[in-house]
Image: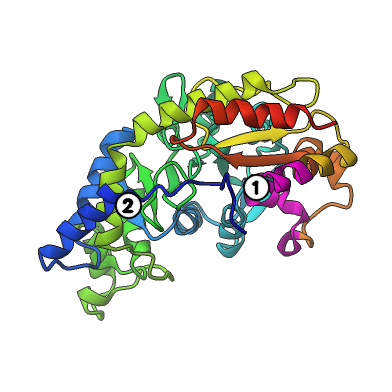
């Protein structure tokens, strides 16, 4: 189906393709090389961290992060979001960690920080917090509690490039953070992701895990020497510290990322203005508009019905379909992950009672594309269209 308002406008521009052509003119190495390193350094400076590792997707960043938690801190529980992309949860499961689920805060759609605090135990190995669709999901109280207990925070900022908490970018508060550069997000490398950290051991482990678990990928001589000394029977070029896979990206993806990064801040400002205009023009008796906007950079218009009304919901969907406006019910990831087949064996029978906020989003929440090329008139017209649904 062709939409008049797709989820995302094409964000790979002519200037990005020109940068790829210039790269190709130089007869370069196209696998991971100098452009990847340059992109990692530029991203780290933009974010405000010491280290970044470019991988082939945000999902791969999730998997590597949870592998680091398992190898560094051992098997145990990870506080996990119910509203997230599937890889947030599957990366926990695949690394033999136990997900402990929490409901969402309706104002940020991120994990309810008070519930997180209630669920912390000696078995907790990490809190895997998702900044959903451009919102900040952190509070000072959560950060203080985790620091007091020495529990690592992992920030999934795959949907929140440039969102801030108290003026500081999300993705800089935890032990490490993950970003996605998929087509629909704030910037794109076609496919790609990033792991960012200030911790050198995490950085070295991420580099190794990115490339089959090979120790030679570490930039630290001391890190490599630990394994070479412990395993003198092995060729130093082929020591595999962890069971991993190939999560590398390419020079082509990196050069697109370097070019897109130049536009990210300006595009984020436009997205913020768009979202604020959208909320200011919605009928507050029909739709939720009380989101926590401070520091947000929303790449989507969040549309959540104020009341659980399936008849009204179906009319909203029919209106959007009729006018060619693409949307996703349940928002990104399909809503409440506990309702998905892969988690049914872990889901409580009383999902709606135990997770009422995420369940409301699951059945009565949507997202619609928000991108820098939208005109103010288009946004106001969309609100008028939604407001007239009865």
Q: Which residue is mark 2?
A: 53
Decide if residue 252 is on the left or right side of residue 345: left
Reply yes or no: does residue 129 show up in magenta.
Answer: no
**Mark found first going from the N terminus, 2 or 1:** 2
Residue 243 lies, with reference to residue 222, above or below; the image says below
Quarter holding the C terminus is: top right
| Magenta region | 317-343
Give x and y (percent) for residue 115.
71, 33
Residue 108 lies, with reference to residue 326, above or below; the image says above
Give me the residue at 52% from left, 55% from top. 74
Give x and y (percent) for residue 334.
68, 51
Give x and y (percent) for residue 163.
46, 30
Q: Residue furthest left?
A: 26
Q: Nearer the viewer, residue 266 or 191?
A: 266
Based on the displayed image, in which of its 4 quarters is residue 31 positioned? Answer: bottom left
Q: Which residue is mark 1?
A: 324
Q: What element does badge 2 sit on?
A: strand
Decide if residue 141 is on the left or right side of residue 200: right
Q: Are marks 2 and 1 in contact (CB under 8 Å)?
A: no
Residue 137 lies, with reference to residue 294, above or below; the image says below
Q: Which mark is residue 165?
A: none
Reply yes or no: does residue 321 show up in magenta.
Answer: yes
Give me the residue at 80% from left, 44% from top. 363
Give me the residue at 22% from left, 79% from top. 235
């Amino acid at each position: 189906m062709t939409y008049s308002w797709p989820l995302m406008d094409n964000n790979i521009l002519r200037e990005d393709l020109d940068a790829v052509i210039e790269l190709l003119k130089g007869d370069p190495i196209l696998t991971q090389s100098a452009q990847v390193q340059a992109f990692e350094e530029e991203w780290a400076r933009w974010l405000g961290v010491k280290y970044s590792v470019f991988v082939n997707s945000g999902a791969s960043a999730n998997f590597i992060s949870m592998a680091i938690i398992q190898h560094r801190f051992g098997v145990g529980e990870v506080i996990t979001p119910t509203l997230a992309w599937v890889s947030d949860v599957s990366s926990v499961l695949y690394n033999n960690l136990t997900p402990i689920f929490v409901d969402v805060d309706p104002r940020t759609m991120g994990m309810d920080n008070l519930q997180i605090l209630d669920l912390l135990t000696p078995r907790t190995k990490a809190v895997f917090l998702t900044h959903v669709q451009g919102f900040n999901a952190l509070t000072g109280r959560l950060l203080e509690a985790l620091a007091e207990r020495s529990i690592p925070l992992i920030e999934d900022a795959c949907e929140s490039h440039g969102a801030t908490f108290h003026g500081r970018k999300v993705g800089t508060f935890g032990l490490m953070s993950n970003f996605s550069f998929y087509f629909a997000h704030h910037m794109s490398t076609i496919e790609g992701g990033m792991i960012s950290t200030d911790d050198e051991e995490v950085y070295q482990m991420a580099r190794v895990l990115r490339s089959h678990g090979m120790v030679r990928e570490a930039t630290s001589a001391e890190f490599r020497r630990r394994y070479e000394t412990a395993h003198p029977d092995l060729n130093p070029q082929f020591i595999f510290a962890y069971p991993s896979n190939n999560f590398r990206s390419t020079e082509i993806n990196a050069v697109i990322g370097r070019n897109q990064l130049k536009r990210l801040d300006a595009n984020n400002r436009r997205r913020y203005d768009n979202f604020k205009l959208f909320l200011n023009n919605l009928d507050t008796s029909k739709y939720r508009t009380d989101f926590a906007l401070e520091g947000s950079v929303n790449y989507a218009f969040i549309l959540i019905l104020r009341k659980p009304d399936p008849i009204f919901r179906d009319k909203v969907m029919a209106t959007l379909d009729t006018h060619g406006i693409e949307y996703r019910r349940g928002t990104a990831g399909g809503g409440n992950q506990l309702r998905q087949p892969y988690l049914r064996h872990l889901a409580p029978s009383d999902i709606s009672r135990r997770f009422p906020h995420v369940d409301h989003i699951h059945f009565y929440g949507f997202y619609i594309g928000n991108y820098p090329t939208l005109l103010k008139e288009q946004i106001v017209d969309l609100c008028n269209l939604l407001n007239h649904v009865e």
